[in-house]
């Protein structure tokens, strides 16, 4: 077994070198671009948000617009927390920061809160518009009512699985390692359910370059997951050995 | 277990501020006076589905723009409607709508419908309106006929069905 001579965590009090400073600037730029690109594309269709400070729209329209913003941000944060989970050690080294696993956890919680606000705002928009409650249809959409409701259902399933994934992350240390890892892995399913939900019925997910951006994010998650699986398999069974060899 | 990072708080602070922003506008909207909630009708007409149907029968040029996804349009739509997903409304041929007596973008509850109406209005399309009662649901509720893949045009058959629906007592 080889050991990595580099420290697992950088001393957060030491002065960062030029490479680390550059990495930090790049990371902040990437994060800002990732969060703002979808919102910029959305304003191409809706106009600027300042329009909704006025009164020239029917009841519920502002809640509907904010629901779309929440959806974009929640999707980006689900992506970010998966990347932080898979790459927290390399990122710690590259950015010269302390342990990032706790950041991964808080990003997961933030993603859940934004994902939860998405249907809450949608339900609020519907109630303001129609004066009627549609809570059941919002939080448990019927799958046999057509294209829109079916793809709403995928989003709802993503939300409930995200809750399970977040709880597994928070209470993970109290569970057996294998059990919590298996439960926490639902976050990958969450990502792809939300990806599919947003690309099929997301109103602004197909504007301009957004389908490309969203597909690239999905490809990054697939690539990093495969790399992690390969590395884990490789460390258990060194080159030339199989699981049968390992048992002897 | 590693100690928590001093950066772990940041995502939660950022999301708290974001949620405050996301809920502030709808809160302000919900607290508006009832007359202020009708201010949007200064720029857009609000027409009852049965009145629109009567306009069609009277020979007026009414153009329905279905701003939902093409798959939703294929399931059901208002007869004669054009399928233009809301993200593509800015690319519609404005000249083809210039002589319309009424242009009605719609979706399920007219959230996307209003965004489409806003875009068309901004492009200079005159007589943009929304269905009273909101979207295709209000058309259904008024007992007016819907088209699937097979009845996409406003032909004699569709006009006959609209007439029959109007002849019946209005839905309560």
Image: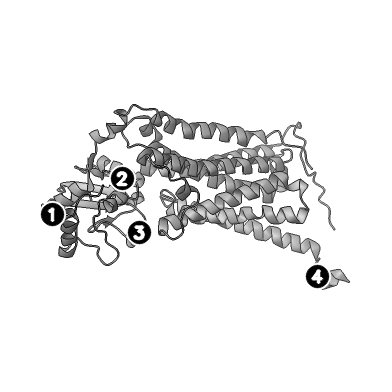
Asked if marks 4 and 2 fall on the same chain, the answer is no
What is the chain identity of the residue bearing mark 2? B
Disc marking residue B57? 1
Q: Are marks 4 and 2 in contact (CB under 8 Å)?
A: no
Helix, strand or loop under label 4: helix
Circle 4 crowding by C-alpha within 10 Å: few under 14, some 14–19, many from 20: few
**Mark 1 vs 2, N-terminal side:** 1
User: Residue B144: which quarter of the image?
Assistant: bottom left
Q: Nearer the viewer, mark 4 or mark 2?
A: 2
Quadrant, the C terminus of chain A? bottom right
Residue at horizontal 45 percent and vertical 42 percent from the top: A123
On whether disc 1 and disc 3 are found on a single subunit, the reply is yes
Q: Is residue B65 visible?
A: yes
Labelled disc at residue B134: 2
Residue A212 in the figure: left or right of residue B129? right
Q: Nearest to the eye among marks 4 and 3: give it.
A: 3
Judging from the image, what secondary structure is the residue with disc 3 in?
helix
């Amino acid at each position: 077994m080889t050991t990595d001579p580099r420290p697992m965590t950088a001393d957060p009090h030491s002065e960062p070198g030029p490479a680390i400073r550059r990495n930090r600037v790049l990371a902040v730029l990437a994060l800002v671009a990732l969060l703002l690109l979808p919102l910029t594309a959305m304003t191409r269709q809706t106009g600027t948000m300042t329009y909704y400070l006025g009164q020239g729209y029917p009841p519920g329209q502002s809640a509907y617009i904010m629901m779309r913003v929440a959806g974009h941000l929640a999707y980006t944060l689900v992506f970010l927390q998966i990347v932080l989970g898979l790459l927290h050690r390399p990122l710690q080294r590259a950015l010269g920061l302390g342990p990032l696993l706790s950041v991964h956890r808080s990003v997961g919680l933030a993603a859940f809160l934004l994902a939860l606000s998405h249907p809450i705002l949608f339900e609020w928009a519907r109630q303001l518009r129609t004066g009627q409650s549609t809570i059941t249809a919002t939080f448990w959409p019927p799958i046999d009512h057509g294209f829109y409701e079916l793809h709403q259902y995928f989003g709802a399933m993503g939300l409930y699985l995200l809750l399970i994934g977040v709880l597994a992350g928070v209470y993970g240390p109290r569970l057996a390692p294998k059990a919590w890892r298996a439960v926490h892995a639902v976050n990958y399913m969450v990502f792809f359910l939300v990806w599919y939900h947003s690309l099929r019925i997301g109103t602004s997910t197909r504007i301009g370059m957004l389908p490309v951006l969203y597909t690239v994010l999905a490809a990054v998650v697939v690539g990093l997951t495969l790399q992690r699986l390969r590395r884990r398999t490789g460390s258990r069974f060194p080159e030339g050995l199989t699981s049968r060899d390992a048992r002897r | 277990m590693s100690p928590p990072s001093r950066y772990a708080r940041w995502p939660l602070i950022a999301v708290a501020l974001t949620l405050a922003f996301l809920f502030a506008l709808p809160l302000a909207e919900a607290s508006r006076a009832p007359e202020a909630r009708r201010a949007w009708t200064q720029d857009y007409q609000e027409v009852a589905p049965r009145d629109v149907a009567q306009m069609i029968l009277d020979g007026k040029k009414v153009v329905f723009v279905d701003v939902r996804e093409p798959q939703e349009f294929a399931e059901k739509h208002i007869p004669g409607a054009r399928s233009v997903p809301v993200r593509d409304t800015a690319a519609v041929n404005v000249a083809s709508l210039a002589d319309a007596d009424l242009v009605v973008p719609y979706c399920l509850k007219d959230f996307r419908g209003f965004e489409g109406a806003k875009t068309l209005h901004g492009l200079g399309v005159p007589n943009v309106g929304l269905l009273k009662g909101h979207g295709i649901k209000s058309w259904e509720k008024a007992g007016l006929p819907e088209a699937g893949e097979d009845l996409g045009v406003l032909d004699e058959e569709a006009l006959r069905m609209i007439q029959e629906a109007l002849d019946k007592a209005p839905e309560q």
